[in-house]
Amino acid sequence: MALYFCLTFRFLDPTFHGRADGGNCEWPPSPLRAFQSLVAAAARRRGGTLDRNSREALQWLEAQPPPTILAPSAVEGSGFCLSVPNNSMDIVAKAWCRGNYSNSGDSSPATHRTMKPVRPRLLSDGAVRFIWALPDSPSDEIRGHIQTLSWAARSVVALGWGIDMAVGHSSTLSAAEVWSLKGERWLPTGDVDNGGLRAPIKGTLDNLTLRHQGFLTRIRPDGFVPPPALSAYQAVSYRRAAHSPGRPIAAFSLLRPDASGFRPFDAARRALTVAGMMRCAAKLAAQRSGGTWTDDKIDAFILGHGAGCGGAQHDGRHVPVGPERFSYLPLPTIEWRGGHRARVVGSIRRVALCCFAHGRKEEIAWARRTLSGRDLVDGRTQQPAAMLSLIPESDRVVRCYTEAASDWATVTPVVLPGYDDPEHLRRRARNGSLSQEQNRRILDHLSKRIEGLLRKAIVQAGFSQELADHAQIDWRKAGFWPGTELAERYGVPDHLRRFPRLHVRIQWRDAHGEPVDVPGPICVGGGRFYGVGLFAAWPGGKLLLYG
């Protein structure tokens, strides 16, 4: 059973004044801020020093991946200013030494004050939680660390400025208990970002100890020596669970081999062919590039094999590589047609490479540099079928697949990650032997199963469970976009032909039912690494007026 270590801070007054680098408002509170509060609390319990158990527990915690943060919704309050000393009492002391006791000018402490702007965050609730995943069966050593940290959490007095008084406690929770907690979930993206939240790393505790010792000995016989700055930490990018990060792409036009114009491909019958030719072109380019493109990396990242040529095998079954691979997305053109200027899905004239895993910007940049100008070779004739030409992400068609929107609909159908009717209930409903009420129940049951499979496919595509749970989903065999064909007419990989195919429309919503703009590319279901289950921004979700 999945277990989590949850560290909770509850503010006595639902406000937060903490600032990030550059004086910007910090929200949610950073993991480093929580770690520093624990260090101070643990030391306070031992008269200002850390015992061995506390040090080992804190070193264990600093070595963990950045936690998930569960925070209440917060708004920036109206600002005000405080009159505070500007640390210039040395000027006042010099005036007094000269005999100036007039309490005016340099001799007055009130003269040397400055106005400090304050703009707190106003919280809807006072609790902020930091959640770390634990092994399925925590060892006695880890349980001991958790107990030590729990004792330290009870001695926390503040999180943020000194006026941000807080009480702390910790607990070990199951996955169900974590999901039942209220608040906005903030997830680490895995990207190191100078504008992100500070998080501890190995060595942070030693660095804090050194800084504290420097602070205690800052006044020396030879003068003032400022304590060393804290340097052992990382800045991690965080995002709301209800929001999805954009993914970098490399987009290309498909030109005729002589570059005389577009080379169109039929979206229903040739999309897999385009994806396969792109895959082969990327493989050849990587083999010729050498460098970091080893055989194993080519097998995994470009070909999608598990480990080694041909893919890994486990008990006779193929082991997929996961999202750490290129996705080849043929992009059907979305164009204006007819007297009413309706937006219609047309043939494929562009293709994009992306990676559904976070990061991987270097591989995408390599594809932009290397693949432009290369031929796509037809696997049957071994003749060039098209030529790639790099285009910017601002291209009007590419933007239909990448710009953030709350409403999306498929241009190629989603392949469900399972059977929608494993018990053949639909066949029983059609033979006329059941009552109207029984037929209704069967259809309701099948509808719920399809909905569950689609939400499962959304999570498998890399979106958060929160987005999947609150999305409004519609599906049918016929396409939502004009110009799309019936779902069964689209080609899919051989191993997916036995699974149902559906055109899908997704309206992204948060827990309050409000629209959430999600950036693309969005590709869901089986075959998503080859452009099967590709979505484009629906006009109702974002106004797209491209001429």
Image (cartoon, rainbow, N blue to C red):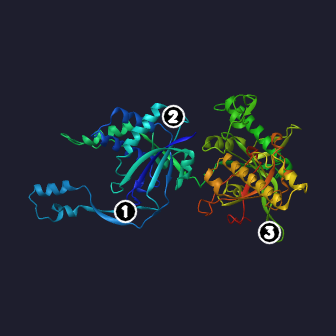
* Residue topped by disc 3: 341
* Residue topped by disc 2: 138
* Residue topped by disc 1: 118
Residue type at mark 3: give it.
Answer: Arg
Residue 229 in picture, x, y percent from top left: 35, 43
Marks 2 & 3, CB-CB < 8 Å contact:
no
Residue 4 in picture, x, y percent from top left: 52, 42
Q: Say what secondary structure mark 3 lies in.
A: loop
Q: Which of the two marks, 2 or 3, is nearer to us in this view?
A: 2
Along the line of sight, the residue nearer the viewer: 256 or 362: 362
Q: Is residue 530 above or below residue 97?
A: above
Along the line of sight, the residue nearer the viewer: 363 or 415: 415
Marks 1 & 2, CB-CB < 8 Å contact:
no
Residue type at mark 1: give it.
Answer: Val
Q: CA distance from mark 1 to mark 3?
A: 53 Å
Q: Residue at x 11, y 65 (%)?
A: 102
